[in-house]
Image (tube, grey):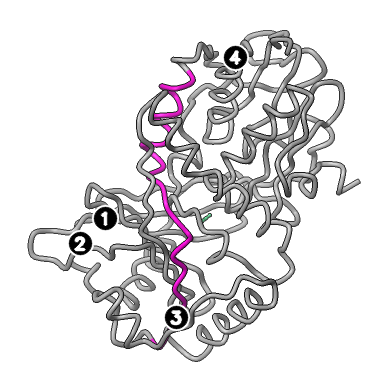
């Protein structure tokens, strides 16, 4: 295999994963990003949950998410060797419902999952409280999804950066403004390369004409909390819920932190945390896990998901050695392993993993 000069535009979870894997495969890699390891990946909750986040009509995203989830344990193990453990939690996920409307939505999800051969266990509120004792008495039922996992996004980003460094990737702290065959234009000049990979998340659309209008920012606000000595311990699994039609989730970290996410708004490139967003999250979380009201509020933040028109990412060649690895919608952390493996396969002239074909950018033409 010829070693290519690869420019990876974007240093979030996707760009860093691609950079690490490509550098480990022997390519000369430069990551172009003014602040690698930040952006939406830094704000994220860390759910790796293709089943709990599935929805009718999104079968291709479900298949791709499952393929990536299957790769996560080996990805985490190799990363631990190259850059440090990313904090992969195998504790599983539960999905809970409070009122009639939320329970109806959950029934739609369970029926859909059964119809596509991914039956999940539906349980009563009482059983759910045996599984997760801190849940409110108002929880009327839910689903057990032991195979949906979680990762500590911040540990992951640090590990990926260390692994990419260790494998020889270089970092250029500049903002890319355009990507074309053989070069990346930045605020400071031009970088030449054999292959360019656009992994710039919500900022990808303006970098290449083929992505114009295909990727847009989708704002999410998120809170980080910590149990105090006198408060109830956090749940031991990820708890996902729909409260009055709005999805929220609680993701426990091994260090005792509890991540509460996330709002979802079309707000352009606005990254302001709003009072309404914080209120919605806390009100929703208290209704499913009342003990959270006593927690220390450690951080509030907002990030911009790279939303795609059909929730599937854009993975594939845009033309002339420019590849897209963007538009991962709500699933950037989940789909990092399969995305990196796809790019490395293409660089080697090999077939990408199962399910990647459906994400080809040409589908929107
Ligand atoms: N995957 C969860 C979110 O995007 O909020």
Q: CA distance from mark 2 to mark 3?
A: 25 Å
Residue under label 4 = 30
The residue wearing badge 2 is: 295
Q: Which residue lies most toward the bottom here?
A: 100
Q: Residues within 10 Å of mark 1 (few under 14, many from 20)?
A: many
The verdict on label 2 being within 8 Å of ligand 1 is no
Task: Please report whichever mark, 4 or 2, sits nearer to the chain's N-terminal start.
Answer: 4
Q: Which one is closest to the eye, mark 2 or mark 3?
A: 3
Of the two numbered discs 3 and 1 on the same chain, state the one appearing first in sequence: 3
Residue contact between numbered discs 4 and 1, judged by CB atoms under 8 Å? no
User: Which residues lie in the magenta part?
Assistant: 140-164
Q: Earlier in the sequence, mark 2 or mark 3?
A: 3
Q: Closer to us: mark 3 or mark 1?
A: 3
Image point (64%, 22%), residue name: 8
Q: Nearer the viewer, mark 4 or mark 2?
A: 4
Q: Which label belongs to residue 225?
A: 1
Badge 1 residue CB within 8 Å of ligand 1: no
Tell me if residue 148 is in the magenta stretch. yes
Q: Secondary structure at mark 3?
A: strand
- Disc 3 versus disc 1: distance between alpha carbons? 24 Å
Residue 153 percent coordinates (x, y): 41, 42
Labels 2 and 1: the sequence-earlier one: 1
Q: Is residue 104 left or right of residue 224?
A: right
């Amino acid at each position: 295999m010829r070693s290519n000069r690869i420019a990876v535009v974007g240093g979030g979870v996707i760009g860093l994963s691609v950079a690490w894997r490509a550098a480990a495969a022997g390519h000369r890699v430069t990551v172009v990003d003014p602040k690698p390891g930040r952006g939406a990946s830094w704000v994220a909750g860390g759910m790796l949950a293709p089943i709990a986040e599935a929805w009718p009509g999104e079968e291709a995203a479900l298949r791709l998410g499952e393929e990536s989830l299957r790769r996560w344990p080996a990805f985490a193990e190799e990363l631990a060797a190259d850059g440090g453990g990313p904090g992969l939690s195998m504790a599983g996920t539960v999905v809970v419902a409070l009122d009639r409307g939320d329970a109806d939505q959950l029934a739609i999800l369970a029926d859909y999952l059964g119809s596509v051969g991914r039956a999940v266990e539906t349980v009563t509120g009482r059983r759910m409280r045996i599984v997760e004792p801190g849940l409110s008495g108002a929880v009327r039922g839910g689903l057990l999804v032991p195979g949906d996992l979680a990762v500590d996004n911040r540990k992951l980003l640090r590990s990926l950066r260390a692994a990419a460094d260790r494998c020889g990737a270089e970092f250029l702290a500049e903002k890319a403004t355009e990507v074309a065959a053989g070069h990346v234009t930045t605020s400071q000049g031009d970088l030449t390369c054999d292959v360019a990979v656009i992994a710039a998340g919500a900022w990808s659309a303006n970098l290449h004409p083929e992505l114009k209008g295909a990727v847009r920012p989708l704002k999410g606000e998120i809170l980080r909390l910590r149990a105090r000595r006198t408060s109830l311990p956090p749940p031991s699994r990820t708890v996902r819920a729909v409260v009055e039609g709005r999805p929220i989730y609680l993701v426990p970290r091994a260090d005792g932190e509890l991540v509460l996410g996330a709002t979802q708004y079309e707000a352009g490139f606005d990254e302001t945390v709003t009072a309404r967003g914080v209120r919605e999250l806390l009100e929703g979380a208290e209704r499913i896990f009342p003990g959270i009201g006593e927690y220390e509020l450690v951080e509030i933040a907002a990030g911009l998901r790279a939303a795609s028109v059909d929730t599937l990412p854009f993975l594939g060649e845009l033309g002339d050695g420019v590849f897209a690895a963007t538009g991962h919608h709500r699933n950037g952390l989940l789909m990092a392993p399969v995305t990196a493996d796809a790019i490395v396969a293409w660089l080697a002239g090999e077939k990408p993993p199962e399910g990647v074909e459906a994400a080809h950018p040409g589908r929107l033409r």
